[in-house]
Image: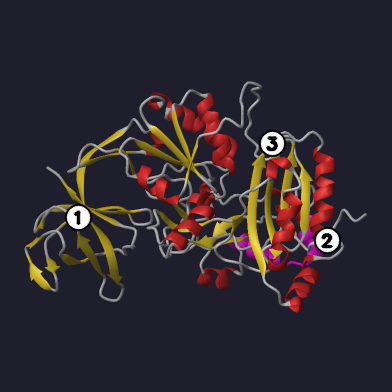
């Protein structure tokens, strides 16, 4: 009875290439009471190994959490191995938008205390008493409600490269850190706000929704199937994406593009970039964002120190790591003083309370009760940036814009850039006033992105 992998990752990759058959990358989870997680684990490994299923799965007395790579021809047979268990009848399998035959190269099924570590020791907390599930269209609609607070229950290195517009993105490295932080920040809004949450595939926000209901929040909602399922629905139903950028995933791809927006930057040079990598030095293995140019110059390393180490002999590297946990075990989550352009976890100014149709009072999600005094009106959005001429183009959607008006151009990567209009072109000709429907161009000393918004500062 085989309960372990017999092939190395390299051997498995070669066999996959030789077979030339499509594989599907998918994820799923289910909360349930499992009496004997070890037997459950063994049975799954045997069944999946026969189907050439690969991936990483955790099982516990509270349920199952899995990310898998399955041959397309074995997809239905794989589903049948799940539906043998009552709690996984008709289970939703989140199939990735982008597929990579090498997303996983071995099969691991591990028994854990919990499928999502939450740091809670409360026997009265019922993980099955969850919030209301929302599909993509419903999720988009509730985001427009001024009484909605949307929270990203992923970690800083995930939300850095992509998130929903207007979301609170906690500066945390683990899910368990976010629960008390958000509970404290939102404690005054239990009765009158819609608490809407999301994560990658739904498993974290499902537990979070149950936790916040347990804490007394009245209106709790969650994105069904997480960002993965949302991306699939907006594509199939031709729905506008309220998510901007890239969805971080936990296979070797480290990201799945949802929109063309690049909202983060290379941690070494500051150029727009949203490609994660792990430092080549096994004793470091730092997770960080690195552009192709820096990857070539730095040889996939996060610092010159690590770059020097990878040129040592393997024996010398082993001596340096002696007595220290292996880098792969540490999996450092992208925070280092050596990264000059690291902004993960720095929360952008997000509108949490909407004053009226003409002005939005902005609130910092680090302390959602700390209001910023500047009042501004959203009047347009970025459409294009002409790199060589350093000119930004915007579509005016509401209100008028005149010469000498003060504006703010705001976006996750751009930040909040304030300037005064001294010259602008309206629909291709120099003008002094722009009205809704007009396209304007401005000379700008900084780059803008398609996710950027144009605000007019109100007196």
Which residue extends farthest right?
A: 1
For residue 431, side relative to residue 412 (left or right): left
Of 140 and 316, the residue lying toward us: 140
User: Mark 2 sits on what residue?
Assistant: 50
Marks 2 and 1, Cα distance to the nearest angstrom?
63 Å
Labelled pair 3, 2 in contact (Cβ < 8 Å):
no
Residue displayed at 29% across by 69% down: 385
Residue 114 picture location, percent across and down: 70, 36
Nearest-to-viewer mark from 3 and 1: 3
Q: Secondary structure at mark 3?
A: loop
Under circle 1, the secondary element is strand
Majority SS type along the magenta span: helix
Q: Which residue is mark 1?
A: 419
Residue 34 x/y as whole percent: 76, 36
Q: Earlier in the sequence, mark 3 or mark 2?
A: 3
Q: Is 296 on the left or on the right of 21, as rendered? A: left
Q: Is residue 405 magenta?
A: no
Callout 2 crowding tier (Cα within 10 Å): few <14, some 14–19, many ≥20:
few
Give the residue number, with chain letter if any, for mark 3: 32
Task: Report the quarter where the N terminus lies.
Answer: bottom right
Residue at point 74% right, 59% down? 77
- Residues drawn in magenta: 303-319
The first of marks 2 and 1 along the sequence is 2
Q: Secondary structure at mark 2?
A: helix
Q: Is residue 218 left or right of residue 76?
A: left
Within-10-Å neighbours for mark 3: few <14, some 14–19, many 20+:
some
Among the 4 quarters of the image, the one containing residue 446? bottom left
């Amino acid at each position: 009875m085989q309960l372990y992998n017999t092939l190395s990752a390299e051997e498995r990759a070669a066999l996959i290439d030789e077979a030339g058959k499509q594989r599907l990358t998918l994820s799923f989870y289910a909360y349930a009471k499992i009496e004997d997680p070890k037997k459950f684990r063994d049975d799954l490994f045997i069944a999946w190994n026969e189907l050439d299923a690969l991936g990483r799965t955790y099982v516990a007395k509270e349920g199952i959490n899995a990310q898998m790579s399955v041959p397309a021809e074995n997809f239905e047979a794989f589903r049948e191995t799940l539906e043998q268990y009552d709690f996984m009848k008709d289970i939703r399998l989140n199939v990735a938008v982008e597929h990579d035959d090498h997303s996983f190269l071995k099969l691991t099924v591990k028994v854990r205390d919990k499928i999502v570590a939450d740091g809670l020791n409360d026997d009265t907390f019922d993980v099955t008493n969850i919030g209301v599930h929302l599909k993509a269209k419903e999720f988009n609609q509730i985001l427009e409600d001024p009484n909605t607070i949307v929270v990203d229950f992923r970690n800083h290195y995930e939300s850095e490269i992509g998130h929903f517009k207007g979301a609170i993105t906690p500066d945390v490295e683990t899910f368990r850190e976010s629960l008390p932080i958000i509970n404290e920040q939102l404690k005054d809004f239990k009765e009158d706000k819609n608490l809407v949450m999301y994560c990658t595939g739904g498993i974290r926000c499902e537990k979070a929704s149950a936790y916040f209901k347990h804490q007394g929040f009245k209106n709790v909602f969650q994105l069904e199937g997480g960002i993965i399922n949302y991306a699939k629905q907006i594509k199939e139903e031709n729905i506008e994406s309220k998510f901007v950028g890239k969805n971080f995933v936990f296979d070797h791809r480290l990201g799945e593009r949802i929109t063309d927006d690049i909202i983060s930057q290379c941690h070494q040079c500051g150029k727009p970039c949203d490609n994660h990598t792990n430092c080549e030095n096994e004793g470091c293995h730092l997770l960080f964002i690195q552009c192709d140019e820096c990857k070539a110059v730095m040889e996939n390393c996060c610092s010159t120190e690590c770059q020097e180490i990878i040129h040592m002999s393997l024996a010398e590297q082993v001596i340096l790591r002696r007595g220290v946990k292996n880098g792969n075990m540490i999996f450092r989550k992208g925070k280092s003083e050596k990264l000059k352009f690291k902004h993960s976890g720095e929360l952008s100014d997000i509108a949490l309370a909407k004053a009226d149709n003409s002005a939005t009072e902005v609130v910092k999600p680090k302390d959602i009760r700390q209001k910023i005094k500047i009042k501004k009106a959203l009047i347009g959005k970025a459409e294009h940036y002409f790199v060589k001429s350093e000119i930004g183009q915007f579509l005016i959607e509401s209100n008028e814009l005149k010469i000498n008006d003060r504006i703010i151009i705001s976006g996750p990567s751009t930040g909040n850039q304030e300037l005064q209009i001294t010259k602008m072109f309206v629909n291709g000709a120099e003008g002094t006033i722009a009205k809704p429907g007009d396209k304007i161009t401005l000379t700008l000393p900084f780059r803008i992105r398609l996710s950027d918004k144009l605000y007019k500062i109100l007196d």
